[in-house]
Amino acid sequence: MEEAIQKLVEAIDRGDIDIEGFEYLLTAEEKSVWNVLKTYKRAMNVNEVREALIYDFVLVLRSEYDFLTRKSRSIPPLPSLWVGDYDLSEENVREFFKEIRKKGLDIDNPRSLTSREMRVIADILKKKGIVSIPSHKMVERILKDFESLGVVISRPDRSGKGKTLYAINPRLAKFLE
C-alpha cells in the first residue's frame, strides 16, 4: 500500500491525481475514517473522528426505530460515513433501544451526548451485533498511518488539552471537491 500512496503523493505534486484509486486500497475501517475527514472538512482529534462514526449510527438507528414503530413512513437512510459490515435487523434495533432505555441514555438529541455516553453507545452497538466501531487506538493508528503516508497532516491542539488534530492534506483536499 505504501508504494501506491507514494504514487498518489507524486500525482498530487504533478497535479494528476486519482482519489478513487487510493480509496480502493483502504480497508472498511480506514475508508470510514477517511470519509469522516472528507465530510467534516476540518481538523479533528481521534475522539471526534470516532464519535462521528457513532453519531452516524445513532441517526440511522433512530430513523430505523421510528420506521419500525410506525412513527415515520420514510425509509430509513443508510450510514453515510461507515463502509464496513453492519446489521440493522428489526430484532437488533429493538434490542438496542431497550438497552439504551435501561442505561438511561437520551438519544433524541444526539448532539448533546457526552463522550462517555458515546462510548457506552459504541459498546451497546458492538454487544447487540449491530456494528463494531473501531476503538480509540485503532482510529489513532489509522490516522497515524495516513499521516506517515502524507495524505493526512497533524498539528497539536492549542486549546491546552494536548491532543493531536488531524486533517486531510490541503494539497490533496482541493482534488476532493
Image (tube, grey):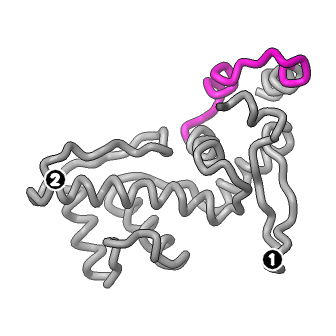
Assess whether mark 1 and mark 2 are in contact (beta carbons under 8 angstroms).
no
Task: Examine the image and state in which quarter residue 121 appears.
Answer: bottom left
Residue 67 badge: 2
| Quarter of the view holding residue 11 | top right
Q: How many marks?
A: 2
- The x and y percentages for residue 80 are 45, 43
Residue 24 is covered by the magenta coloring: yes
Viewer-closest of 126 and 75: 75
Question: Is 62 on the left-hand or right-hand side of 123?
Answer: left
Closer to the camera in the image, 174 or 12 = 174
Kindly identify which numbered label has been placed on residue 101.
none
Q: Which residues are magenta?
A: 11-28
Main secondary structure found in the magenta portion: helix
Q: Relative to 23, is 10 on the left or the right?
A: right
- Residue 169 coordinates in the image, percent (x, y): 81, 41
Q: Please, is residue 20 above or below residue 40 in the view?
A: above
- Residue at image coords 76%, 27%: 1
Amino acid at pointer 2: Phe
Q: Is residue 169 left or right of residue 127?
A: right
* Label 2: how many Cα within 10 Å (few below 14, some 14–19, many 20+): some
**Front in this rendered view, residue 114 or 91:** 114
According to the picture, the residue beneath numbered tag 1 turns out to be 159
